[in-house]
Image (cartoon, rainbow, N blue to C red):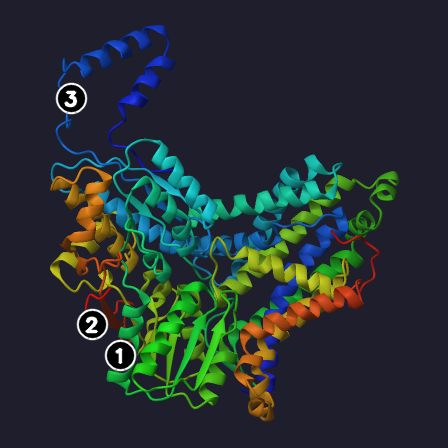
Amino acid sequence: MAIAQLLVEVLALGAAYALVALGFVLILNATGAVNFAQGDLVMAGGFGAVLLADRLHVSGLVLLPALLAGMAVLGVVVALAAYMPLRRRPPEAVFISTIAVGIILQNVANRLFGAEPVATPPLFGAGRVRFAGVDASVQSVAIIGVAALLIAALYTLFTHTQFGRRLRATAYDRDMAMAIGIPVDRMIAGTFAVAAALAGAAGLLLSNTFFVTPSSGSDYMIKAYIAVVIGGWGSIRGAVAGALLIAAFEVLYPSLPLLVPALLWMPSSDAVFSQTTSTIVLDVAVLLILVVRPQGLFGEAARQRP
Amino acid sequence: MQGDRRLGSPKKGLTNAHHAGGLGYLFGMAFATLVLFGGLPVAHTAEPAPDVPVLVPITGFLAAEGSSQRNGALLALQNPPAGVHPRFAVTDTGTSPEGAVNALERALSDGEVTVVVASMLGTQMLAMLPIAQAQKVPLITMSGTADITRKGNPYIFRFFPADSVVKGAQVKYAIEAHHIQKPAVIYQTTAYGQSGHAEILTALAAAGIKPVYEDALDVGVKDMRPVIAKAVASGADSLLLQLHGGPTALFLKAVAAMDVHLPIVAGSGLSQPATVALLEPAELKGVCGETGSSPISGETPAARDFLARYRDAFHTDPDGFALGQYDATMMALEAVAKGATSAEAVTKALATGSYQGVAMTYKSNGHGDMAHSAVIVCFDGTSRVPAVVRHYDFPISP
């Protein structure tokens, strides 16, 4: 298995994880609270894509705009239900309310779609492509392209639009933003909409290859949380870097003996480079980062970690 | 909670009348008096009406399998033997032991429970066992966790073949059909995976075979390619899997994408229609798997009849869990039809009797293990319906 091929897979998986982590960071920065429903919004996006594909019979790429719009509406609903009524309470109240929203989403999905795993449609189609000697699946390449476009669009939104500047102002200092006339509540609802749309896109991208079930959101939530801890609490660049690092651990670490055959001669090489050990090593790395560099690799915001 | 109760208990009827107001209360009392003194003919009073709560996980990570279990039980309860009128309600136990214990306590507090359709999740079963023993109520389940029938509890009856049976069949088939000598064993880190892994190693050791590669996967692992590549690099001549349904589909997709052509004999996760639905027929070509039964294959007239009725009732395909739970529930209801109307009597009938179900013949080994047969199913690459290629009947041993 060539290193270039593995890197394509790392980029594809990391790009999709990055969308989840970015949504997580946006809400964290805007509200100071952790949105524990972010993983379940990924799941909702996956099922939303399945539903749309069932009705429209089009490829994933064609239904992506409709999915983003639908998920943005769901994000506003989550903001209205789980954040707005509690915004003057301690952040712990929002943690609990978003956990409740996540459980509600899981049970609604279970009721509407059943418990069995389903797959979203591919972005373009099945099959594999060969480019510069690298053999990769069409879906993996498409995931990298679509995620890159979405991240670029997000960057443009935040840096080149008035709406984005207001969102950033709200995230930076809510009281000051309110004092200069920015409609803070609407900005926060907008942030939830953007975060949910990103989660929905991740659901579409990931669930074609990895399927979606009502309970699959919790796994993405944990990955988003770890990505943000690694990258830096509140850092957007850090969230992307953290997501890529998680994907690298998942794909590259277990493959090390294939990339470096000398490692096969290590005692218990199978166990040392197993998938289970890769999870343990990643979590040990997270603990080390928390101890040695609590602000994360790209820590730029002096926020208190809940 | 969902489901229905076919007959309301007299206690509930009085309570409702009381709440209806004064006149309703008077009518209720008059009705109750008439019933007590035999003044009114009441339908079915001479026929048994066993109370059969269905306590299964229909949300959480085991929701797909739990839903199959529920459907199998419901099909039996809605089509009971002549003269039996079961009362039943479905309770979702979730996936926590507390959820299962609460559901059982609540069901038992409702009245005279005859037999309980109990969760297929081993940790929930272990928590429910002491209560069942204290209350002397039999539990019929599809849980594969070995320990539940090793605790000396006379009220547990497992209708899914134990790991020693299905894993024995899996290894036996791999040796007979593919002459394996250097298998790679890939299993899940869950109790299901580890228990099956141990039985696979035992069966391989009995044949003098040692795996050349073993790896345990967390259920959250998405990318299977590194594991497959390492298994191939190890020189393995076959892949033996003990993975849940979703990971089995992920694994087979990756195998097809990597163009690996080693013989694959999977665990029972493969035989679930939901797993197969995630794969293209071509991705399944040549893949085989063990299971207790494969109702979708429609091997016998009874299996075809079950398949048709299940599809009609639930608009989906059944798996081995659904059929096993159907057979289990029917065995208990047949015991009731033959006069075992109390929990103790049903326990005795299950412990000592034999029952010819749709999937196989069930008989306790003295510890509550009722199923002792397994089948191997294989896919030909043209459809998602597997063919049963081999039956294995194991001796009933304690």
Residue situated in front as seen by the camera: A290 or A241: A290
Residue situated in front as seen by the camera: B38 or B8: B38
Residue holding disc 3: B42
Mark 1 or 2, nearer chain start: 1
Callout 3: SS = loop
Q: Residue at x 25, y 83 (%)?
A: B177
Residue situated in front as seen by the camera: B167 or B297: B167
The quarter holding residue A89 reads top right
Residue holding disc 2: B392
Chain letter for mark 2: B
- Give the residue type at disc 2: Tyr
Q: Residue at x 14, y 42 (%)?
A: B81
The reply to whether dot 1 and dot 2 touch (C-beta < 8 Å) is yes
Mark 3 or 2, nearer chain start: 3
- Give the residue type at disc 1: Lys
What whole-number distance in Å separates the C-alpha atoms at marks 1 and 2?
Answer: 9 Å
Mark 3 or 1, nearer chain start: 3
Callout 1: SS = helix
Residue holding disc 1: B172
